[in-house]
Image: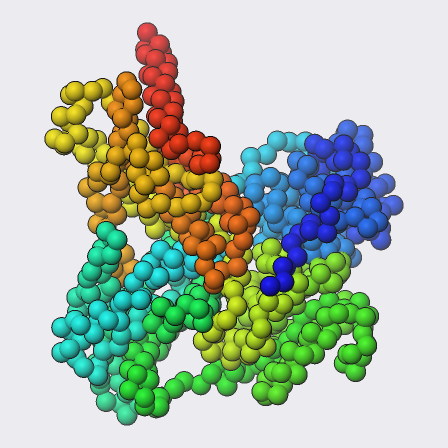
Amino acid sequence: MAEARRPGDDSDEDTSPSGSDWKDCDVAIFYKTDEPFRIEKTILNYFNRAEIKYVRPGLSNLVGSSEYKNIAKAIQNSKKTLLILSSNCKSIDFSLETYLALERCLQTGRLSLMVLMIDGLTIRDLPDIPFLQQATQMILVDNYHERCMETICKALKREVQLNKLLPAGNFAVGMAWSHFSGYLKKILPELAQRIQKSDVFQNNLGRMSTVFFMLCPLSAKGRPNIEDADPDVKNMGKIEWTKDGRPYSPTVYKVKGKNEKGIEEEYLCCAEYPNALCALALIAEEALNLFTPQQRRIEVERFRYKLEEILNHSRNTDCLGRARVLMFDDEAKGRSNSPSSVLFQAVRGAIEETMLRPLSDKPESPLAQAKCRVDVCFLYSDTEGGGESRWGHSKNPDDKTIHKIRAFLEDKKVRCSIARPPADDTAVIEERVQEARWVCCLMSPYSIKQKKFIEFWLAALLNKCIEENQLKIVILLKDIDSSYIPNFIRWVTYIDITNEPSSEERIYDIIKGEVVHLKSQVPAGNVAFGLAWAFHVNYLRHVLPDFSDRLNQRMEEDDIRKRKAVKECRLSQHFLQIIPKSCDFKPLLNLVDDRISEPFYLKPVVRQISGTERKFSCKLYRIEGEKYDYYFAGEMLTPVNTLSEMNKSMIAGLSKNQMYEQCDALVEQLKAILDSKATPEEMHNKCRCITFDDAKRKLADVIMDEIDKEMETDNMTKYAEWLKKQ
């Protein structure tokens, strides 16, 4: 399989000019390069007088050097980044790689972004791009130039507290993989057989489906019980079994509706709101308002597409055809957007398919429903211009790629158009994007080097069309990987056309609205962010609030209390999340080190979540030390298992190096969430992440050292408090 290009792959050496000049700069400055003299005279001179150390990466690159590396290094080594925008130059000559460098530093909390607006540009005129809207915004007023520059210089020198929780990548991809590997992969292979053996199925032959249905409302909100949201849905009990010590209990629902003749019918099925998806609504409401309602809807669509890609992969035979994802707009008016209506149509259709009868009320495809003039607009960079007749002998390598895909789609009666910045006029591009239902945006080594491929105005236009016209964007990756997709493009899915043998068919299926069946690997992308949030919202929020009480109660039960009477013990008051450097996940810690006892169990937390009863059990372990018995509640960080499964899987395209990178990012993000106000007060200081090199150290030694340090810290804190009282 061909390896996709990653940022900076074209050189392993540091090609940055005067690396010492870029070290610890106060600010990296970007502005339109066709007016440098004016900027230097009216702005940079003030910076020189104020002894502000700055670098201009756009003017400093060496010929033949890696632009991405140089720009990324300048941004990372600078305390702030300043974008200077004017009314005539609302954009800057950025290549896509510059956007990526800015976004990455923002994501990791290493950058404070500032925007300086000059020549009458106002905040209202600022392009609607998330990282611009979140930046510190300043206006240079000509009549008060001197005073404004003093204020700007002070702002550039001022220390700032960076927000570590700026959106990093997307939630949905990580959450989809988490839901699959932690839940669906375990229940789907045997759920259909267990349904068929159940009394409720035998008593309702021909009226109950063995398919598992997942409701995905665009609000991402799910009730604990589906019948609470709709009177035409009734809870009929559960299908219960235990696997590998974990109980599973999908809920059976009866759904009532009317067929095409208006006759009332009832059907049964197992259904629920995906637990991972419902975390999105909680994050949107509670966790610092990380995204808007429209961004939340985009994440729901991404979740649906990614989950369908995984479930319907040709190599995933144990899950193929056993589950369906039902996306609907629960915030819209009308009976057709209710859970009962969506379930009724889907369950009835699944039963008819099983009985080999044609669907009598199969809905029209999105292509037939669409009222747009064009089904899909292909957006890619071209500096040559010229008409469509120039395909075949164009110097642009992407022309042939787009021509091939377009020809395939037009043979299937799909209406296509093309927009090629900067060769095509701005008005032409705007018209073609606005009249399309889908935009397929091609990203390749050629396009990302073009400085006018996606300017601010085009990014803002895409976002506006998504908001107003329900436009959807598919990213086509050619000889590069998903790390090149900027976050401000609200894509619903992406396709690696280099490694996907039937990419044209897949594009057609997506545009047509069909379920996508993959044969090659599903691109993993940035999953760490979604994994961290899903783990926090769907697990830690349930087990941490009363963790201390349950831990201390368990320590007083007879089996432990009697041993404590014989030998002194030390107890960690934290719920320890263990992360091995190798990502070699084990379900029980005694399987990692035989000096760790078999687990005791704390009292489980029982919750009704997304239509299913969930039990959360925390494990308690003992290590026999020379002087003390060490007790701790802990486990291997569950999302590490997701990364490990993705690496081992033939479905996910996650290399070992990518797995290690994602694991580091996962731990960093989880720590940031735990330390933020997104974590309720009753959860503070109750969970700790411990990373260790399992090739060099034994886990028992690591745990005992951590507990000893914890005890020493507690003793010092108690002593300091005692001194204050004296």
Q: Residue furthest toward the top?
A: 726
Percent position (x, y) of residue 131?
A: 60, 51
Q: Quadrant of residue 373?
A: bottom right
Pick whichever, 373 or 379, lies toward us.
Answer: 379
Seen in the picture, residue 623 relative to 38 is either above or below; the reply is: above
Q: Residue furthest toward the right?
A: 37
Seen in the picture, residue 189 relative to 131 is either above or below; the reply is: below
Which color scheme does this rendered protein use? rainbow
| Residue plotted at (86% across, 41% down) | 41
Seen in the picture, residue 284 relative to 188 is either above or below; the reply is: above
Pick whichever, 245 or 571, lies toward us.
Answer: 245
Percent position (x, y) of residue 421?
A: 74, 68
| Residue plotted at (36% across, 42% down) | 636
Q: In this view of the protein, can residue 168 be seen by the observer? A: no
Q: Quadrant of residue 208?
A: bottom left
Q: Quadrant of the N terminus?
A: bottom right
Q: Quadrant of residue 499?
A: bottom right
Q: Is residue 265 left or right of residue 488?
A: left
Q: Is residue 340 left or right of residue 37?
A: left
Percent position (x, y) of residue 578?
A: 39, 38
